[in-house]
Amino acid sequence: MAAKERFDLTGKTALVTGGSRGIGRAIALALAEHGANVAIVYHSATEAAEEVVAKIKKLGRKAWAFKQDLGQIEALHGLADTAWKTCGKIDVLVNNAGMAYLQRFNEIGLEHFRRVLAVNLEAPFFLTQRIAEHMIAHGIKGRVINLSSKNGLVAEAGLAHYNASKGGIELLTQSLAIELGEHGITVNTIAPGIIITEIGGDFEIDIEGFCKYYYEHIPLEHRFGEVEECVGAAVYFASTAGSYTTGTRILMDGGVLSEQVPRMQYMKRYTNTITGKPGPMKTSYKPKKKQKLADVAKGKK
């Protein structure tokens, strides 16, 4: 099989939760562009869901939309059964839907804590549990793709419940990869950094100050990611190209986790040795008498 053909999803059917907006919408459309029929699950954005379905059908694929609050865990096996019966089969499950509240630890109540864990962690498990059973029963070597986050690897203030849910997804993915491996089903995660979506729109925060600070800590062009930059990983995991990849993740955070201590903005500005032109990143460095780290630290005390 040619390398290009290994990314072809013709004849496959995917189910994408949270598929009406943001990363889920982009993944749903990308899978359809690569040949898959696609069903999406949405919570309340009916008009947006209908638009996604129309776009998928315009590509010549079959498309469906199922309305479901993923926080209603007891209903998810039923959702899985309905989706399987309606679509005929599910080859690829993308557990994308997620939510977050920005709250200090002492502001988090039981309702919010449980809601975040239900949507972000419990729903992916119970949907996967039922869909995987159908895959096994029908001899389908399927694909499960969970949307994690860099917050599944390192924590951020104000997101204790969200961090916990994404850390859980990382180990849940590995656990399911182990148990489903004998059936030829792969389970992996996509772990984005900050991607420009609707999530976080109602956070109580100095957003301009936060963005300015965060940009300085993103090595790759000092910018946030776009939803379209997440779809390549989904296509890879969903396709034959990813048939021997399981229990792992693709991290797409612009390099945030690669740099333990941001330093470049304080160093001499980059200058190309061939053209002599400076790089785009300005720094605060100014030639002056050298100081030792120990002296500065003493001054702080």
Image (tube, rainbow, N blue to C red):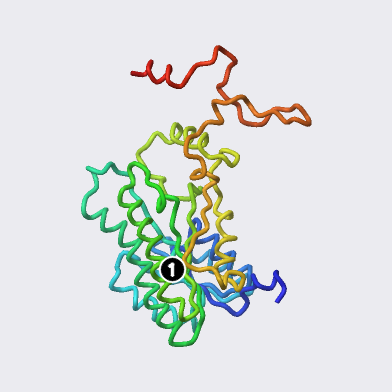
Q: Which amino acid does label 1 sit on?
A: Val
Question: Residue 88: image x %, image y %?
Answer: 49, 84
Question: Residue 180: image x %, image y %?
Answer: 43, 76
Q: Is residue 48 visible?
A: no
Image point 38% across, 62% down: which residue? 171
- Helix or strand or loop: what does disc 1 sit on? strand
Q: Which of 89 and 41 is in front in this view?
A: 89
What residue occupies the far bottom of the structure in this picture? Answer: 138
Question: Residue 279: image x %, image y %?
Answer: 67, 31
Whether 145 is drawn above or below 180: the answer is above
Image point 54% across, 63% down: which residue? 27
In the image, is 36 to the left or to the right of 132?
right
Question: Residue 61: image x %, image y %?
Answer: 60, 75
Q: Which of 87 and 113 is in front in this view?
A: 113
Whether 35 is drawn above or below 276: the answer is below
Whether 90 is drawn above or below 166: the answer is below
Image point 43% across, 78% down: which residue? 83
Q: Could you classify mark 1 by the number of other residues whose Cα lies within 10 Å: few (under 14), some (14-19), or many (20 or more)?
A: many
Q: Can residue 210 be seen in this view?
A: yes
Locate the C terminus and report the quarter of the image it occupies: top left
What residue is shown with label 1? 41
